[in-house]
Amino acid sequence: MTTTNEFGYVDDEGNVFLNSPSGATKIGQYAAGEPNEGLAFFTKRYHDLISEVELAAARLKDGKGNVESITALIERIDKAIESPNLLGDFEKIKAGKDALLAGFEEYKAVATAKKAEAKAAAIAKREELVALAESLAESNAWKATGEKYKELLEEWKKLPSADRAKEQELWKRFSHARSAFDKARRAYFTTLDAGRAEAISAKKALIKKADELAESTEWASTTTAFKKLMDDWKATARAAKGQEEKLWNEFKAAQDKFFASRNAANSVRDEEFTKNLEVKLELLKKAEALLPISDAESAKSALREIQEAWEKAGHVPRNDKDKIERRLKVVEDAIRKVQEEHWHRTKPEVVDRANTLVTSFEANIAKLQKQKSAAEAAGKSDEAAKLDAQITQTQGLLDAARSGAASLG
């Protein structure tokens, strides 16, 4: 029993034959089932190939083809034509191949152009990355710039390959810029580490001095010494963050120990000085009772006794010292002012100047009065009026001078 179709047939023994212009050609054998199954199997191979060719042509037309897969398909078509292993219209297969080749050449031309564009774009992008890398080479923003170089490198790796010579030239520039930055950064941190080592040594020396001073009871001089240590600490470079904090805590512990002892001693002292304050407050009442000063000599004598008692009373709490001393100074200044005014009034040369001024005004008035009388006798009323006004003005000055002279002596 023979099973046939328009492209070939399968005999009873499962031999498959392809019809051709030169006659039937055996292309295989199907022993896995009935002849009609063999016919369907080898015919399906044909339809599968045609479908694959049509799909590949459509993908090429849409610009979605793949060079490798199209090349492999063409090779399979050539093999199927040279050594048939399917039943079908081989003219259609050849026509499909020709159409596929035409589309494939066009696709390759477009793909080649796109590839060239992509390479050019990759070169342009690499040039951009190189320019940015070179602009960062002298940056000292170490952390941010280091991260930026990592980003640039990742961008570089993601770019497609381009012209090898140009790419290597750009990579050399990129690498040189990054290396220059890395070298400067390593040099900086090497110097920084050395500086930090010196800072640690210097601060440990300051801590040792602080520990030696922590037990001192020389409050004033040691307070000054601690201030000097604090200034030296601030002037010293910082160590690494963790070490700096540890060193500072050690220094501050010694400092706090001294000042805690000083504050405790001051509290005891202030308690003792409070009694002295009470004494001085009573003395202040007596001193302020002398105001206003009416008799400078008696006030001065009374103040002298108060001042002697003031000195004997001793120290007062620091917070009260300036306040009560300012109040006592007000009384002292008031007595001094009264004494200075009295001295000024009794000073011989001052008295002489005042009397001379009175005499001068009196002589001037006498002269003006003679001139006035002469003007009146000559009938010069206007001139006489002016002279009278001058006499009145000079008389006012004379009265003031007499008053001033009377207050002296």
Image (tube, rainbow, N blue to C red):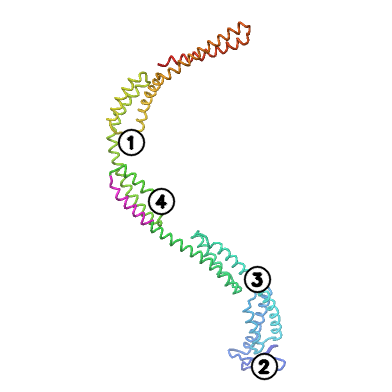
The answer to which image quadrant residue 223 occupies is top left
Main SS of residues in magenta: helix
Q: Is residue 318 above or below residue 309?
A: below
Q: Secondary structure at mark 1?
A: helix
Mark found first going from the N terminus, 4 or 1: 4
Q: Nearer the viewer, mark 2 or mark 3?
A: 3
Q: Secondary structure at mark 3?
A: helix
Whether 254 is among the magenta residues is no
Name the spot of residue 368 as percent of width and height, x first.
55, 11
Q: Nearer the viewer, residue 277 or 219?
A: 219
Mark found first going from the N terminus, 4 or 2: 2
Q: Nearer the viewer, mark 4 or mark 1?
A: 4
- Dot 1, how many residues are within 10 Å of its Cα: few (below 14), some (14-19), or many (20+)? few
Pointer 4: what residue? 235
The reply to whether discs 3 and 1 touch (Cβ–Cβ < 8 Å) is no
Mark found first going from the N terminus, 2 or 3: 2
Label 2 and label 3: CA atoms lie apart by 50 Å
Label 4 and label 1: CA atoms lie apart by 31 Å
Q: Secondary structure at mark 2?
A: strand
Label 4 and label 3: CA atoms lie apart by 60 Å
Q: Nearer the viewer, residue 284 or 89?
A: 284
Disc sitting over residue 117 in the figure: 3
Of the 4 image quadrants, the one containing the C terminus is top left
- Dot 3, how many residues are within 10 Å of its Cα: few (below 14), some (14-19), or many (20+)? few
Q: Residue at x 36, y 26 (%)?
A: 332
Disc sitting over residue 318 in the figure: 1
Q: Residue at x 36, y 47 (%)?
A: 228
Pointer 2: what residue? 25
Amino acid on which disc 2 is placed: Thr
Q: Which residues are magenta?
A: 199-216
